Amino acid sequence: MLQRKDVLGLRDMTREEILEILTVAQEMKKRIDHPELRTSELHHTSIVTLFYENSTRTKTSFALAGKYLGATVQDLGISTSSVNKGESLIDTGKTLDQMGVEIMIMRNSYTGAPHVLARNVNAHVINAGDGSNEHPTQALLDLYTILEYKKHFEGLKVAIIGDISHSRVARSNVFGLQKLGAEVVLAGPSTLLGSAQLLGVKTTSDIREAVKDADIVMGLRIQFERQKTTNFPGIGEYRDLFGINQEVLSYAKKDVLVMHPGPVNRGVELSGDVIDGQNSVINIQVKNGVAVRMAILKLLAKGGEA
Amino acid sequence: MKLLIRGGRVIDPATKTDEVMDLLIEDGTIIARGKALTEMADQVIDAQGKWVTPGLIDVHVHLREPGYEYKETIHTGSKAAVMGGYTTICCMPNTDPVVDNEIMVEYIKMKAAREGYCHVLPIGAITKGQEGKELANIGRMVKAGACGISEDGKSVMDAGLLKTAMKYSKMFDIPVMSHCEDKSLVGGGVMNAGTQAQLLGLKGISNDSEEVIIARDILLARATGARLHLCHVSTKGGIALIEDAKRHGQEVSAEITPHHFTLCDRDVLDYDANTKMNPPLRSMDDVLALRQALKDDVVNIIATDHAPHSEDEKNCEYERAPFGIVGLETAFALGNTVLVQGGWLTPMQLIAKMSTNPARLIHLDKGSLEVGKTADISIFDPEAEVVVCAADFASKGHNTPFDGWKVQGKVCYTIVDGQIRMAEGVIQE
C-alpha cells in the first residue's frame, strides 16, 4: 500500500506509486456507475477541503470521491472562514488538526503551500493545485485515461498545447509521463513556454510539429488570471496560431485522444467540433477524476502513517 | 588600563603585516606593537594560534529600528555584530520611517551610543521615503553622520533622478550604494531563474534583471564621476561589467555576500524560505565567478546584507515570505571555510575584504592595526570547528540556511574602542 503521508506532486512520486494508484482507481471506477458497489470503508475518516482558489469540478470531484467511500467531507468555505480575518495557513491547518481531520485537500495560489501545510500538520495533505507548480490528481486522472485507452505508456507521443508556463497540469503530467516512458512535447507561444525545456522535454511553437503523429493531444486553458503582463496580443491571434481545430488534429494519429483538464475556453484552445468530436475523451476524464481521487483517499487513509 | 594581546598572528592589511607579535592597547588606542613586548598590562589575552585582525566592518546590514523592532533592534543587531567579530556596522535606511533626513540619522546614532555594542553608522536614503521621486536631505544627513546613501531594497528606477543624486553626492565625497534590480524584469520571481526554479515550480529571477541596472549605474557613475558601490553583486555577468569598467580606468566598488559565494540555487529545497533572499542564490556558474572575482580583487568587499525577519514571517508559503537572511554571526566562518580553506583567498585578503577595504569605502579611519589607531580589534581561531546553531544567535532573526552547518573559524574576542565587548562567545556588558 502507498506508504506516504501526503500527495503533493508527481515530481517526488515513484513510478510504482503512480501505477498503484491507477490500479486501485480501476476498481473504484466501477463504484461510480454502480451505486450498489459503494462501500462505507472510510466511514471513520474525516476530510476537509480548503480551496483558496476557485474551483467547481476539482472540489466537487474530491467531495464525491470521499462520500462514495463513506467518509465525512466538510468544506472550509475560505471566504467565510477565519482565513478572511488574516489567519495564517499554518494556524488554519493546526486548528483543523485539533478538530480531528485526517485528510486535508488544499488548493492554493502559492507554489509550495501544500508542502508548508504538510510539514506543520499531522493530517494527510493532498495537493489539489498549488500556484504554477503541480496538480497531481489532475495528472493522475489524465494518466488513468491514457492507460484506459492506450493500455500502455511506453513510446506514446503526448502533445500538450497552450499556456505552458502557468500550467500546473502540464508540469505534473510531464513529471508523470516521463516516469512512465512516454514522450512529451510542449507547445505554445514562446512567451508562454517559460523555461519548460529545462524539465528535459521538447518544446516548440509549431503546433503542427507538436501534433504530428501524436497519440494524445492535450489542450490547456489560457489562464488569464495568472498573467500579470501581456504575453500575447489577444485571443483572436491565439486562436489563429495555436487553436486546435480539425485541420491541426489531422496531423495526429488517427486514433488520437483529445484531452483537456477543463474548464475549456470553447473556440479558443479547442474548436467546438474537436471538443465534441469522436476523439475527445474530455468527459471521460471527469469521471476518471472521481475514480482516481477515490483511490488516493482510500490508499492514504488505509496505508499512510498519519 | 592597559590590555596586552600576546603572541597572536597579527594580520593587518593596512600595513601589509602578517606575523606573530604582540599588541598593546591603552585608553582605546593601540600604543605599541612588536615581538615580545615586555610592558606591564592590567589584562593579558593569550592569542597564540589565533588571528589578531582589525575589527570587521560591515557596510550592509539591516537593523530594522525604528519601525520593525520585532525583527531586530540596534541593541540586538549590534550584539550579533560583536558576536560575529564586527566592530563597525553600517545600517541601511529602509526602516519605518525611512532614514531620509538628519533627525533620523541622529536618532540611530543616539540609540547606538546608548544601547549598542559596536560602532553603528547610518546610511541615508537617496530619495525621500525611498519613493524614487525627490532627493532626500543628503547634505544634512552627511553632516549628521551618514556614511553613504542607498535606496537598498530597490533601485532608483528614474535614471535622471539617480544621475542628479550622483552629481549631488560628489560634493560630500560619499559612496552611492546601488541595489541593482529592475522590477519590471523580476515579475513575481522568488528564486534564481533556472532548472531548480523550473523543478520547484517557482517563478524565476533572471540575471539580466540585476545586470541591466549594474550597467546603467556604471554608465551614470562614469558620466558624473560619483563613487559607485554596487551592493550584493550575484551574477557572473555583473562581475564582467565591473571588470570592463575597471579596464576603462573607472573605479567601481562592489560587495559580495557570504551566502552568495557559499550557496547556489540547488540549495533551495522543499520551499524553505530561509533560502529566499534578494538577489537570489544563483547558479553554481555564478558562484564560481563570484569566488574568482574575490580572488582576483575585482570585488574588494564582503558584506553580509544581514536581513533579520521573524520566525512566522519565514515559516509560511515561500512566495509570501519576505526576502533576506541574517549574516553577521556566520560571515567570518563562511569566509574562512569557503574562501580561505577552499583556496580562493589568503587570510590577508579575507581580512582586507571584511575590514580594511570597507573602511576605505566610507573613508573611515579604521581597518588598521597601526600604532596610534583606535583599538577596534577582533581575534579569531581559524582552526576551531563550529556548528552553527540559529537558536543561539544574538540576533532576533534566526532566519539562516546555515543552521546545523559544520564550519571552521570561531570568533574569540571582539574589542571595540579598547573595550572587550565579547569574549569566548560571551557578551561583556
Image (tube, rainbow, N blue to C red):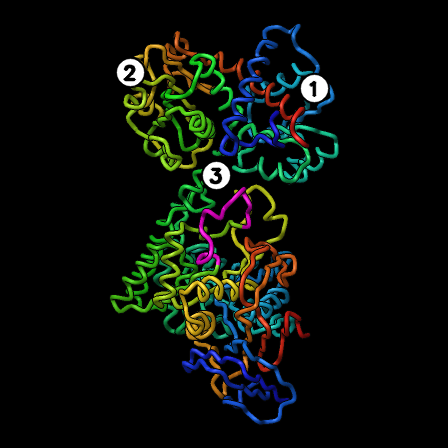
Residue B280, image x, y percentages: 45, 51
Residue A251, label in figure:
2
Residue B166 highlighted magenta (yes or no): no
Do discs 3 and 1 share a chain? no
Q: Is residue A292 above or below residue B157?
A: above
Q: Are marks 2 and 3 in contact (CB under 8 Å)?
A: no
Report helix, strand or loop for mark 2.
loop
| Range drawn in magenta | B259-274
Q: Name the subunit of mark 2.
A: A
Q: Which quadrant of the view contains residue B220?
A: bottom left
Q: Amino acid at mark 2?
A: Tyr
Report helix, strand or loop for mark 3.
helix
Looking at the image, which residue is at 65% across and 35% down?
A83
| Distance from the alpha carbon under mark 2 to that under mark 1 | 46 Å
Looking at the image, which residue is at 59% across and 82% down?
B418
B227 horizontally vs B389: left or right: left
Q: Amino acid at mark 3?
A: Leu
Front label number (2 vs 1):
1
- Which residue position holds label 3? B200
- Which residue position holds label 1? A42
Residue B385, image x, y percentages: 57, 64
| Distance from the alpha carbon under mark 2 to that under mark 3 | 33 Å
> Badge 2 local density, few (<14 within 10 Å), some, or many (20+)?
some
| Distance from the alpha carbon under mark 3 to that under mark 1 | 33 Å
Q: Name the subunit of mark 1.
A: A
Residue A29, label in figure:
none
Residue B343, image x, y percentages: 41, 65
A31 horizontally vs A189: left or right: right
Looking at the image, which residue is at 49% across and 83% down?
B20
